[in-house]
Amino acid sequence: MLRITRKQQQAHLARDDAFAEWYVEDFMQFNLPRFYHALSAQGKREMTINGRHWARLHGFEDAEAQGHFITLMWEVGADFFRHEGFRQIAERDGDDMARIDAFYEIDPDTAATAIQNADDRYWYPVENGLTKGDAT
């Protein structure tokens, strides 16, 4: 019996440019249209790749989980992973998708605080002088 692993299924998304193309054109366009239409083609892709960088810094290797992480950056804030509740989940070890599920279970008041205090500089960390130490 032929078995194809999740990693093999996601192999076409291994390169950042391929991942960004998939995320922007196959997901963002239909699920985050207000952001998709507000930004240039290059800007969307750069932000997606930068978001993937933050996801990887927090140990998310699964492409689907990285897509969810980036979506949370759009919906909650580019630095959602620094805020109380989200930070504890981002910093813990464990299955990528289980941690993503935990992000979605954050109580609304905690999420609202993160949304109200979002810092968009995290979309462009290098240009804004942010380092790995700024991830927490």
Image: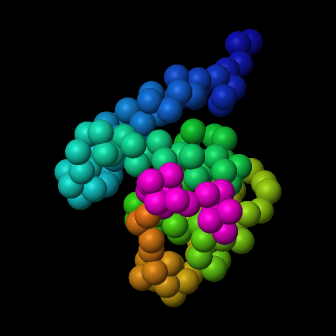
Which residue does the image show at 58% across and 52% down from the upper left? Answer: 54
Residue 55 is situated, as x and y percent measured from the top left of the image, at: 60, 51
Find the residue positioned furthest to the left.
37
Q: Can residue 115 be seen in this view?
A: yes
In depth, the one of 116 and 22 nearer the eye is 116
Q: Which of 91 and 5 is in front in this view?
A: 91
Kindly identify the residue that appears in the image at 60 percent across and 71 percent down: 82
Q: Residue at x 70, y 13 (%)?
A: 2
Q: Is residue 120 above or below residue 54?
A: below
* Image position of 23 (left or right of 50): left
Q: Can residue 27 be seen in this view?
A: no
In front of the other: 74 or 47:
47
Q: In which quarter of the image is the C terminus?
A: bottom right
Left or right: residue 21 versus residue 56 is left
- From the image, give the main secondary structure of the stretch colored magenta: loop
Whole-percent x, y for residue 115 in the image: 44, 77
